[in-house]
Image: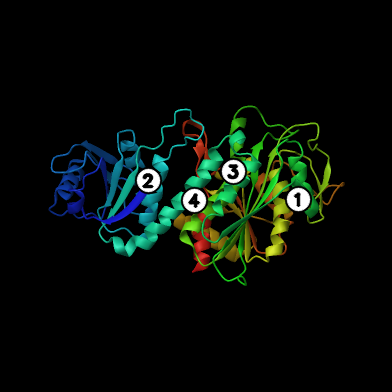
Amino acid sequence: MNFELETLDLSAASKEKCDALIVLISSSFKPGKDVLSLLAARALKAGDLEAKPGKTLALYRPAGLACVRAVLAHAGEGSAHEVSKAVRAAVLAVKAGNVKKLVICFATLPLDAQLRAGVTAAADASYVFTTTKSKPQGRAIERVVMGVSDSSALKPVFDRAVAAVAGIEFAKEWSNRPANYATPELLAGAAHALAKLANIKCEVLGPKQVQKLGMGAFMAVAQGSEEPLRFIVLRYSGAVKSEAPTVLVGKGVTFDSGGISIKPAADMDEMKFDMSGAASVLGVFRALGEIKPAINVVGLIPACENLLDGRSIKPGDVVTSMSGQTIEILNTDAEGRLVLCDALTYAERFKPRAVVDIATLTGACVIALGGVRSGLFSVNDELAAALVSAGETSLDLCWRMPLDDDYAEGLKTNFADVANVAGRAGGAITAAKFLQRFTEKFPWAHLDIAGTAWKSGKEKGATGRPVALLLEYLLAQAK
């Protein structure tokens, strides 16, 4: 789907030939004398268009308009969140029709955040996964024109929003793929493909190299699978070499059966999404290659499967991490922290300005925050504040959780330096406390995206989160 930005007021939009025209109206709307303004004013006065965010009125071949279909969509007070809600509702109202060209026109000049929200919502509402369909029917919409009263002023914001959408959809693609279409090797191939973009390089380490590094925790998770592990290292170099990079670490468990501590059969298919952290890192790099900001970023992805086999790790086994710390594995389904801890130790070599790990880590975080906000853990106030702010700006929300030292008490064991679980109470926090042991040499934050990385039920599929949050954070650092 191609996005374009054009200067279109309501008068010009009424003459725009297209399959569908969406007009975004907020409470500050003041109608002019053009056809669209008068139509919207009448609809509001009659109550046919409710003045609530996400309410729409659909029309077919309306008199005086050049479009085939028109949708009046109310965006409430006009906040970015309300614009997103309105665009999403309007696109869903027309996407079932034969709509190839879609025009989305703002009745009033949007702010940066509103335009970004409109672009993102239009892409999200029209997204279709087709990779594993025998007769794929992708999104019908081929071209989306965003109409604003002054396109030149908003062009940089628009270009960044389109690049972000490319990254989000790249993350969705790889998260949505079933495990046999997204093995560690195939994930490494996706990373290699990104190296064709500006300023990006990719290196992939195999089992022998990982063993030489001493990544005993990562190797322990992978040893029950016939698919060989891959440790993916992506580098985006947009600034001088002396500038310390930000490191993103994405959990890349391409399928998680739970291992010997096997998961219940119900919904186990959704464990293909357990590499959504890795997919978000790939998505960020996809966007960075388009935007080309003056920053340095490193992406680390420990990719493997967690399966049952005669070689699988067992509850009670003790492994030695790359840091030298020994870990008693009390639950093989707490594997994400094992692959991440070695990647966090590996991150030390880059002398990073900050490290953010992203993982579908705990069901406990889903219970705590649901699917609205990702869990954010950090003892660094400046880093935490920057991530929270990025989430608010991008509408990819997170919530800071506690990291009191008392939560680490349950990780003590008689048989190793640390256990990999600490019981059910505060499970998302104790998982973060485990990871914190491996982050003493750099500012660190952990994003638990178990509740936000995908949706279940009728709308089952990846969300592409938190690509938007991470990208906003990185670009803010570039400023």
Label 3 sits on what residue type?
Answer: Ala
- Mark number for residue 122? 2
**How far across and down, in percent of the image, does residue 431 sit?**
69, 48
Mark 4 element type:
helix
**How far across and down, in percent of the image, does residue 13 sit?**
21, 50
From the image, state whether disc 1 or disc 4 is nearer to you. Answer: 1
Query: Is residue 406 or residue 148 the one in the foreground?
Result: 148
> In this figure, which residue is indicated by the disc labeled 3?
450
Mark 1 element type:
helix
Q: CA distance from mark 3 to mark 1?
A: 27 Å
From the image, state whether disc 3 or disc 1 is nearer to you. Answer: 1
Q: CA distance from mark 3 to mark 2?
A: 25 Å
Q: Is residue 282 above or below residue 260?
A: below
> In this figure, which residue is indicated by the disc labeled 4?
167
Q: Is residue 420 visible?
A: no
Q: Earlier in the sequence, mark 3 or mark 1?
A: 1
From the image, state whether disc 3 or disc 2 is nearer to you. Answer: 2
Mark 3 element type:
loop
Q: Earlier in the sequence, mark 2 or mark 1?
A: 2
Q: CA distance from mark 2 to mark 1?
A: 42 Å
The answer to whether marks 1 and 4 mark residues whose Cβ atoms lie closer than 8 Å is no
- Who's the residue at 53% across and 40% down the image? 454
> In this figure, which residue is indicated by the disc labeled 1?
210
